[in-house]
Image: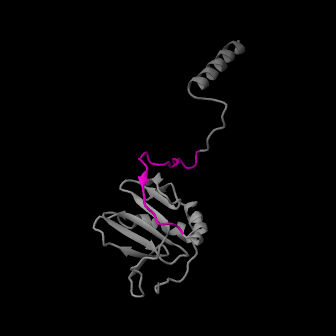
Amino acid sequence: MVTAVVLPLVVVLLVLTRVLGGDDAEPVADVGNTPVPERADLPPLPVEAPPIPPEAEAPCEDLLGELPLELAGEQSRRVDSDSPYVYAWGEPPVVLRCGVERPAALEPTSPLIQISGVNWLVDTADPDRIVWTAVDRPVYVQVTVSADTDSAPVTALGPVINDTLPLQPIDTDG
């Protein structure tokens, strides 16, 4: 009698497992119920970037290899650029360029803002955007945001920059 009840129950459970999505694949680990970030479903962003000097290639590769898929609540997006050292997130876009030229405005008296251990030169000359340039690393890292974006992106990038690009004295002599 027990076999008559258990066998149909096992069959029903197997059928339900197949119908409801059970398969032979390994289960995916649930780590703290945190969804895995993906790239935003946005068109590729065209980004101009100057040629990168050879000495900037290794540090920029290190930095780009550690950039997050999500930055300040914005998902990464694809870029269309001649440089492999450009990355972007969201809309309006936050654009990072690694290995840019020394900012012309960097002088001994330039006001710098230190956020998350990184010294930034902030350019607000364009009313539509703010350009933050990390000036205390072996390569200059530029982050461009819309004029109405606060410092959240550069704050979030600080630990990544600190972990991948060593601190160095600021070259204000040009």
* In-image side of 8 versus 158 (left or right): right
What kind of colouring is applied to the model shown? one colour
Instruction: Give coordinates of residue 107: x percent, y percent.
Output: 41, 85
Foreground of the two, 162 or 144: 144
Using the image, determine if residue 167 lies above or below residue 42. below
- Is residue 37 part of the magenta span, yes or no? yes
Magenta range: 30-52
Using the image, determine if residue 36 lies above or below residue 169. above
**Secondary structure mainly formed by the magenta segment:** loop
Q: Quadrant of residue 129?
A: bottom left
- Is residue 117 part of the magenta span, yes or no? no
Instruction: Give coordinates of residue 174: x percent, y percent.
Output: 47, 84
| Residue sitting at x 47%, y 65% | 97
Instruction: Give coordinates of residue 69: x percent, y percent.
Output: 50, 54
Counting the numbered discs, the total is: 0
| Residue sitting at x 43%, y 50% | 44
Q: Residue furthest left?
A: 127
* In-image side of 7 versus 52 (left or right): right
Using the image, determine if residue 103 lies above or below residue 57. below
Instruction: Give coordinates of residue 87: x percent, y percent.
Output: 48, 58
| Residue sitting at x 30%, y 73% | 125
Tell me the quarter of the image containing the N terminus: top right
Foreground of the two, 119 or 47: 47
| Residue sitting at x 38%, y 80% | 105
